Amino acid sequence: MTTEENLVVVGKITSVYGIKGWVKVYSWTDPKESIFNYQPWYLESTAGAPELVDIDEYRPQGQGLVAHICGVDDRDEARQYCQRNILVVAQQLPALDAGEYYWHELEGLQVYSSFEQNRQLLGVIGRMMETGANDVMVVEPCEGSIDEQQRLVPFVIDAYHTEVDLQAGTLTLDWDPAF
């Protein structure tokens, strides 16, 4: 049985493509075409439970990707799927090596600084961002954090991070809280 708790976001349907019910797909997988390896897709819904959709065709198109949703053969019908996140069952994702993490595993972790051996709660990881150089954690203030400041912290394990404990829900890093 699929529950919302074991679904993770791997991309987004952004807009319609053509007149025959195809949609443009933005993928957060690496490589981007890997998004099609994880089927079925569930689309986030504001009206309740995620909606199951089957993709019967897909292909690269220019710099992006396009897909056809089974049974959707009209541009206007395809429009209802636009601007919705694509979710898949987390267990479909490949296992990672030790010390590697999926973004969904990091989001929600409490972030502690151990700068100069002084352990302080900075906040929680609200989301992750990809930049050209490295991934960045958006650390949001939370109850018990040292201040109400949002922080953008590079996610560079060897440089700043000393410990990720998924079981405890914490990430400890050597980061000056003044930043």
Image (cartoon, grey):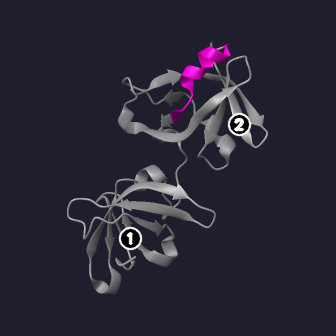
Quarter occupied by residue 177: bottom left
Residue 86, label in figure: none
Q: Position of residue 42 (x, y in %)?
A: 49, 28
Which residue appears at 43% of the width and 60% of the height?
Answer: 138
Quarter occupied by residue 112: bottom left
Q: Residues within 10 Å of mark 2 (few under 14, many from 20)?
A: some
Q: Identify residue for label 2.
A: 65
The N terminus: image quadrant: top left
Label 2: element kind? strand
Q: Is residue 107 above or below residue 153?
A: above
Magenta-drawn segment: 73-86
| Left or right: 31, with 171 as reference point | right
Of marks 1 and 2, which one's residue comes earlier in the chain? 2
Residue that protrudes farthest toward the bottom in the picture: 116
Residue 163, label in figure: 1
Q: Position of residue 149 (x, y in %)?
A: 33, 66
**Tags 1 and 2 touching, CB below 8 Å:** no
Q: Is residue 75 above or below residue 127?
A: above
**152 magenta-colored:** no
Label 1: element kind? strand
Q: Is residue 69 above or below residue 161?
A: above
Which residue appears at 67% of the width and 48% of the height?
Answer: 31
Mark in the foreground, 1 or 2: 2
Q: Is residue 114 above or below residue 25?
A: below
